[in-house]
Amino acid sequence: MSSPASTTAPDPGDDLLTTEVELADGTVLAVQESGRADGPALLLLAGQANSHAWWTDLRDGFADFRVVSFDYRGTGATRADDHDDGWSTELFADDACAVMDALGIERAHVYGTSMGGRVAQMLAIRSPERVDRLVLACTSPGGSVARERGPDVRRRIATPDPAERARALLDLFYTPACAERRLRSHLLGDTSMTSRAQMRHLRVSARHDASDRLGEIVAPTLVLHGADDVMTPVQNATVIAQRIPGSRLQLTRAGRHGFFDEFSDTVTPGVIGFLRE
């Protein structure tokens, strides 16, 4: 069983309402809320090796919703056993359900980006009754049908030089014209993570495989991707859209892996319009 382990209180760093959800295995998930308490619930799922900070510049765009996020195991303020080998997109989807249970949310819209899109797929497959509308951005189905990033991309982001790696990530996430977002991006990883937790998140993404189960998703689904994304190649979006019945595919011209942030002025209203249908 999951239960709130502390009274909801303001988060001075983010102006969020924060609480903790304790799970049966001893994990204590850090949970954040913003927006309207009486609005439709919207669960935001961040990318790999990132905490809720991923959504810092985007949350206000969803102010009419009851916006919920949580720090994955190994990230942010979540307290979890760093030596357990059971982390997976299935487990993270179960964690999302536990958060919803603790907050009294029976059903929510779900917006997952990058690894969060993988988690969102598993949530919609394993717990279809919990997902109202589903948005999957810059993500992959996993398995044999997935289009993997090229060796040059892997080499650039595997460099041991933190400054060089940051420059590589900025180029992979944003166009050169996006100076403002590049300067204050929240998408480049949670620096508080241990190296072991970072590696385990990498395995969570790499081992994800929903390819043969995407047809089970019944939630109305919007698939979004940047047309110039080489971090998670755009062909993955086509595969996902083809396999989820009735889904819609929208590509952002010139968008890279962080297109939903760089082009949020158009992407976010599009997401909201879809959620309100």
Image (spheres, rainbow, N blue to C red):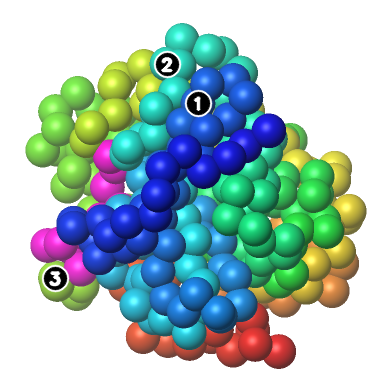
Q: Which mark is residue 179?
A: 3
First in sequence: mark 2 vs mark 3: 2
Q: Dot 3: what SS?
A: helix
Can residue 85 be seen here? yes
- Residue 201 in picture, x, y percent from top left: 46, 30
Q: Which residue is mark 1?
A: 27
- Residue 245 in picture, x, y percent from top left: 87, 67
What's under tag 3, amino acid-wise?
Ala
Residue 224 covered by magenta stretch: no
First in sequence: mark 1 vs mark 2: 1
Report the span colored magenta: 181-190
Q: Is residue 171 left or right of residue 233?
A: left
- Front residue (pair 63, 195): 63
User: How crowded is the residue under tag 2: few (<14 C-alpha within 10 Å), some, or many (20+)?
Assistant: few
Q: Dot 2: what SS?
A: loop
Residue 90 against residue 112 in the figure, above or below: above
The answer to which quarter of the image holds residue 128 is: bottom right
Q: Is residue 132 left or right of residue 38?
A: right
Q: Which residue is mark 2?
A: 82
Position of the C terminus by quadrant: bottom right
First in sequence: mark 1 vs mark 3: 1
What's under tag 2, amino acid-wise?
Asp
Q: Is residue 64 left or right of residue 256?
A: right
